[in-house]
Amino acid sequence: MPILQHFCETLYHSGFGTMLRESNNAFSVIESVHVLSITLLFGTIAILDLRMLGLVLRTISVSSMARNVLPLTWSGFAVSVMSGFLLFWAEAEKMYANPSFRAKLVLLTLAGINALVFHSTIYRRAHEWESQHVSPWRARITAIASLALWSGVIVAGRAIAYF
Amino acid sequence: MSLHAWFMALAHSPLGRAMQNSRWGFAVVEMVHLLGLAVLGGSVLIVDLRLLGVILKGESAITISRELNRLLLGSLAIMVLSGIALLSEEAGKCYYSPAFRWKMVLLASAVIFYFTLHRQAILHARSGTPKFWPRIAAVVSLLLWLGVGVAGRAIGLL
């Protein structure tokens, strides 16, 4: 048996996983926290992306926006990863084969790589372009990729329940 | 026509029929509803955290609010339209759902608050007056919108 599948089954059948799955309220409450934290994550990063595209808040510099908004994005990310892991724990055996869950993990990875590329390349020279109303094309590409990938994460995440 | 009759009319409308008979309709509209929620949540949060003086302190609250107003109302419109489609699938159930009733009351309160007292608070935030009222308005706004979300999530559970 593949090691990942074994891992998923161990989680699924663990006492804690079973408790989460069979509880009346725990799963729903964690799910609500997950949705709210994703709202925090996506809502804040989307506004930074739209700023770089020159669609909102053009008069505020991109670095000022990033400094103010990214801590919120990271908080949302941290809470959604933790709540998401608990949801996964409860349903791990089913998640292993769920195509939407797999798609969501791939999209999450791509969103992470996109953010890494942005921060390690174009954003390093942000002082040269931070005040421009519309950011340089390389920043705009990562902004569009970010909007598309995070939307994909939400869509794939919602679809998990339908498989 | 009673309120219940309106709900029934929506359920039996072509939109309701289409939603009830389609395999993926509900899921797709739900996804749109969630994407709208994320953008609405982000806009509300940025405006209210600025009013609270937590973020973007060096920038004008009026500018931020005016700029994000379009985004906020645009995503709200997407949520209302997708919400009507979701409602049409199970209007009969929603009519009796306490969570749905709470959500509508909170939504109406949040929207009215946004266009009245919240707007006043943003105008106050600029001048040198004490920042007490803008902060209260920001907290009330955050709580109202959070309440809409929580009640909405509860519709599927209660």
Image (cartoon, coloured by chain):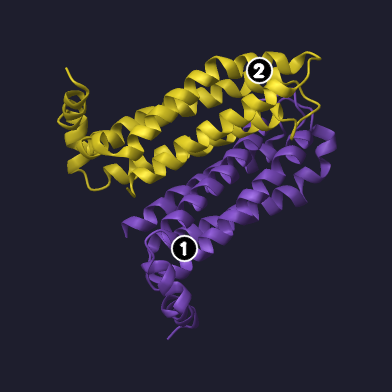
Chain colours: A purple, B yellow
Residue plotted at (70% across, 54% down):
A116
Crowd class of label 1 (few under 14; some 14 to 19; many from 20; radius 10 Å)? many
Q: Secondary structure at mark 1?
A: helix
Picture coordinates of residue A75 (x, y %)? 66, 50
User: Residue B9 location, x and y as percent?
Assistant: 16, 26
Instruction: State which quadrant residue A144 falls in.
Output: top right
Residue furthest out toward the bottom: A1
Instruction: Say which quarter of the image contains residue B26.
Output: top left
Secondary structure of the residue carrying numbered label 2: helix
In the displayed structure, would residue A29 be above or below residue B96?
A: below
Q: Chain of mark 1?
A: A
**Most distant residue in the right direction:** A127
> Is residue A74 visible to the viewer in this orientation of the structure?
yes
Q: Residue at x 44, y 29 (%)?
A: B106
The relative height of residue B21 versus residue B16 in the rendered view (above or below) is: below
Identify the residue at horizontal 46%, vertical 39% (top origin).
Answer: B149
